[in-house]
Image: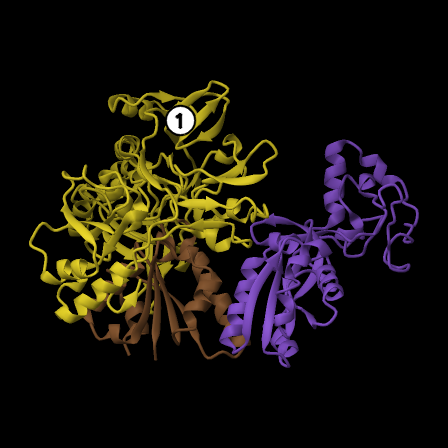
Amino acid sequence: MQVALFGSDRSLPLWVTEELERMAFSFEVVTPEKTKALLPSSFVVVLGSALLTEDEVAELALRLGVNPLRVAVFPYEEVRDLPEEKCRTLWQGFLRSLVPPKRDVAAFRVTPTRRVLLYPEGDERLCEAFARARIPVVSFPSFVLSRKGVDFHVMPHDIPVGACVLIPSLQEEPPVVLPREVLDTGRVVALERLPQVLGLSSLRKMCVVLLVPSPHPYPEDWERIFALASLPPQGAQVLVLAEEVFVAREGFEEAFRRAREAGVLFEKLPLSRVSLSPSLDMRRVVVTYTPEKDPFPVRCEAHWLVPVSRKTCVLPPFDKVLLSDREVVLELPENPNLLPFATNIPGVFVAWGDVEDLVVTVSRYLEEGSIQEEGRVRVDAERCALCLTCLRSCPTGAIGLSGDLKRCIAVNEALCARCGICAGLCPARAITFEVVHRVLGNHRL
Amino acid sequence: MIVGERKPLREILESLSPYREVLVLGCGACVTVCLAGGEKEAREVAALLRLKGFAAEAASVERQCEREFLVPLREKVPAFQAVLSLACGVGVQTLSEVFPGIPVLPGLNTSFMGAPLAQGVWEERCIGCGECIVHRFGGICPVARCAKNLLNGPCGGSKNGRCEVRPDRDCAWQLIYDRMKALGRLEELFVIQPPKNWGPSRFGAQRKIVREDVRR
Amino acid sequence: MSLGIIGCERSGFPALCALGKEEPEIWDRIVEVFPVPCLGGVDEETILRILLRCDTLLLVGCPPASCRNAWGSTLAEKRVARVSQLLEEAEIPKRVFCVFANPNRLGELKARVVV
């Protein structure tokens, strides 16, 4: 058997080469530059880390131009410090476990079309930002989308677009239920109007209480809150009761610090623990709350109460426009393992938060695309019972029906994340993923 | 399709206690689609039985309710002491007719005829009464979906569109009303429905259909 | 008590390796390690098959809110709950647990692995 060793160019320990010779493997050491000599039947053995993911292996396979199933990773980095005898046994076991793959798999890079669809149409700020990044933007009053590979096709205009940006609408509601009597004091003011109101009043020592619900990706409110630090010196005493303070943004940490230094008090607690009532003279609002850390209720009289509205993001009905065999389930982009703004459906982004950041994310997605594999996942049409479990459970929406009579499910490999959820759920065991086994320690991986 | 639910494991183990070598047989039709008794579930049960010390093997056929699909098992089945069938009641009986010498045990409770509403949710839609009348009710069957099987409904106990017998279920008559309203046929609900003919239903003898035109 | 581990290659498996560096003796107890692309793809039969060779099986994956495949970890959690219930029903003295970990969050894994 032919083996191409790929890995650190430092000198290999003896046990690597000796065992290869003993087992009558012919081998060579390759680097990314020197790959033309690779025989199609040879294995590329990566002397790397056990932590290499399948995606990284696929990328390497694409770079070397070989079947990803012929790329086997030996956890050299983890193993090399073990006693030599142990290394030898492991290496032997690994070499023995190399079996030629049954499938022809090819790695390829999918790059989406450089065009973005805005849904619903119109948002000048977004259009301008995309124009600056030289990404063409389209939007239509009415259309349907169909998926072709990694692209969307806008029908009936028949325009391919690489990404869809959903413009959510904001739904605002008060952070807590405001009792009627509290509203009657006339001391409840919106955050936007607060600087104005404070500027007009002449009272020297005033108390302002802000009620802020858990953070949402709309940072403008927090900008306003932190700016309260720059009130004139005779200004009010400000107490911010927040479910969470939002500092995960450039400059916010600093602004938060400055606000605290200027005397703005921040208290983190669930707003359900705040109770509101009017003062006896109906000219102030009595705010009572129990802080998170100690059990004694705190009572203060606010001259102004600022309920910052709880904003929820309502996405446009994307499942109504995407022609798909299944209902589209969009995960809102709060997952740190997804791109920011991205949803679980590849190519669908949500325009919330900073416009520039969004454009950068989308443009990177359009330029880099992703590495995919053709042939890794296989559907056995004879076994498939068409129960549609896979189609309903695929997290990326990569599964649809194929054929005129929709007689079999089809996997769109440009979208497949190779998670294996469909194969694990399939009751007829019709979906199979070819997996490369890896070896670590005395354990078969 | 027929929707089933696997029997509690305790019950399965109890019925299997006299045997050691067991074949767990899945069915590739309805019970595969409702994720109760396909090949995957058969292998799962077999793996559990092996953990429990049985010599269990799993297999699956296209449809257990038809003899022709059971023919390939003729050589395999006699090697086992018992067969645990994960098919519906129809499949279990066909299986025991084809293999009279081997005990065939049911591993599944056949629940109802229904439809998947979402991934992992199934709901009854038809009781097989033998005389379909859904066209009179806007395509919603009160016999299968109303807890009281009312043909002249609603009963008056429906609350917020929910059934008073099982508040987690929709009131069929609310659905019928909404649908008839949408169709602009509300006045048809004023017609008093005559008593239903239950003759073709389960209350006579075992039902049977003989079609001379296609019979060989 | 022997231990088997199925780890997702994004979080669970790297977490295990990180813990292995910290406490190398855990490797003596671990008899099986399987890295998988996502925990959601591990079916019941695989779990039961690996259980034949060990007493306790841990499925180590991303915390549900950060699973790259939307509901992969949630699915694994439900599946493990179901398999545990089946094992209990059958009175089989084996254990399966779902553990959420990543290299920066080893606490839960450590509690399960280190005796």
Residue A303: image location, x then y, percent: 32, 48
- Residue farthest toward the top in the current orientation of the protein: A157
Drawn side of residue A178 relative to residue A360, left or right: right
Colour displayed for chain B in the image of the structure = purple
Q: Is residue B178 above or below residue A389?
A: above
Q: Residue at x 54, y 44 (%)?
A: A381
Q: Residue at x 42, y 71 (%)?
A: C51
Amino acid at circle 1: Leu
Image quarter of residue C24: bottom left
Chain of the residue where label 1 is placed in the rendered structure = A
List the residue tagged with mark 1: A118
Crowding at mark 1 (Cα within 10 Å: few <14, some 14-19, many 20+): many
Drawn side of residue A39 relative to residue B67, left or right: left
Q: Is residue B19 above or below residue B105?
A: below
Residue C102 visible at all: no
- Seen from the viewer's position, the closer of residues A404 and B70 is B70
Drawn side of residue B103 relative to residue C45, left or right: right
Colour displayed for chain C in the image of the structure = brown
Point out the image quarter for the C terminus of chain A.
Answer: bottom left
Residue C113: image location, x then y, percent: 30, 73
Drawn side of residue A302 relative to residue B15, left or right: left
- Seen from the viewer's position, the closer of residues A63 and C35 is A63
Q: Residue at x 26, y 61 (%)?
A: A94
Residue B133: image location, x then y, percent: 84, 43
- Residue farthest toward the left in the current orientation of the protein: A11
Q: How is the image coloured?
A: by chain
Q: Is label 1 in a helix, a strand or a loop?
A: strand
Residue B194: image location, x then y, percent: 93, 46
Residue A412 visible at all: yes
Colour displayed for chain A in the image of the structure = yellow
